[in-house]
Image (tube, coloured by chain):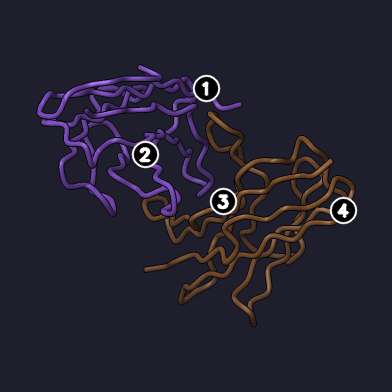
Chain colours: A brown, B purple
Amino acid sequence: AQSVTQPDIHITVSEGASLELRCNYSYGATPYLFWYVQSPGQGLQLLLKYFSGDTLVQGIKGFEAEFKRSQSSFNLRKPSVHWSDAAEYFCAVGAGNNDMRFGAGTRLTVKP
Amino acid sequence: DAGITQSPRHKVTETGTPVTLRCHQTENHRYMYWYRQDPGHGLRLIHYSYGVKDTDKGEVSDGYSVSRSKTEDFLLTLESATSSQTSVYFCAISGGAETQYFGPGTRLLVL
């Protein structure tokens, strides 16, 4: 079965600084890859997804992610973080509609 | 936002009592899922449904049952709640294109 690792449990960045959240996956074929964001007390909102094609995908709220097959990675980036980006971020890998696996999440704190 | 509601949003219950959580969708999506979210574990799949009366187990199904008698409703039942089932429960839906959309969650506390 596929699995997902988010190596960073908690990251703190200053407002206006760049951000990169790491995600590594394990899967035998080309996976479907997702990033979701969860604000406190809320459900998960889809930021972006990769199914095939261009390995650099753009999402909502100014986020982007790059699929690197050779590194089994799908890192999330944002050039300039806003205070409203403080949340928990989940990477997920899907192999079919009944089997999506989530990472444990990375909590982002934004310093003023 | 996808039309997904969950009820109740918060529940406190006692060990050994039955609990039913409801997920309702207005998107007419075929697939529905129940996850639990616990610190350090992300989301883990409990059960899913691929159509009316068609359900299957997920990664952490022990102690849970589900039913889907209508396209729009997916019920999760804890037959006899235990403290280990204290968690936040999320429902998700999918139209078949892999992408899942999540409801607002139900916070369950089992005393």
Check disc 3: other Cα within 10 Å, few if <14, some if 14-19, many if 20+: many
- Disc 3 versus disc 2: distance between alpha carbons? 17 Å
Identify residue type, mark 1.
Gly
- Percent of width and height locating residue A76: 71, 58
- Disc 2 versus disc 1: distance between alpha carbons? 14 Å
Q: Are marks 4 and 2 in contact (CB under 8 Å)?
A: no
Identify residue type, mark 3.
Phe
Residue B108 placement, left or right of A55: left
Identify residue type, mark 2.
Tyr
Q: Quadrant of residue A86?
A: top right
| Residue under numbered circle 3 | A90
Q: Are marks 3 and 4 in contact (CB under 8 Å)?
A: no
Residue nearest the observer in this picture, A85 or B15: B15
Check disc 2: other Cα within 10 Å, few if <14, some if 14-19, many if 20+: many
Residue depicted at x 20% and y 29%? B77
| Residue under numbered circle 2 | B33
| Residue under numbered circle 4 | A17
Q: Earlier in the sequence, mark 3 or mark 4?
A: 4
Disc nearest the viewer among 3 and 2: 3
- Percent of width and height locating residue A23: 60, 65
- Disc 4 versus disc 2: distance between alpha carbons? 37 Å
Residue B49 placement, left or right of A50: left
Quadrant for the C terminus of chain A, please. Answer: top right
| Residue under numbered circle 1 | B3
Residue nearest the observer in this picture, A93 or B8: B8
Residue depicted at x 68% and y 74%? A68
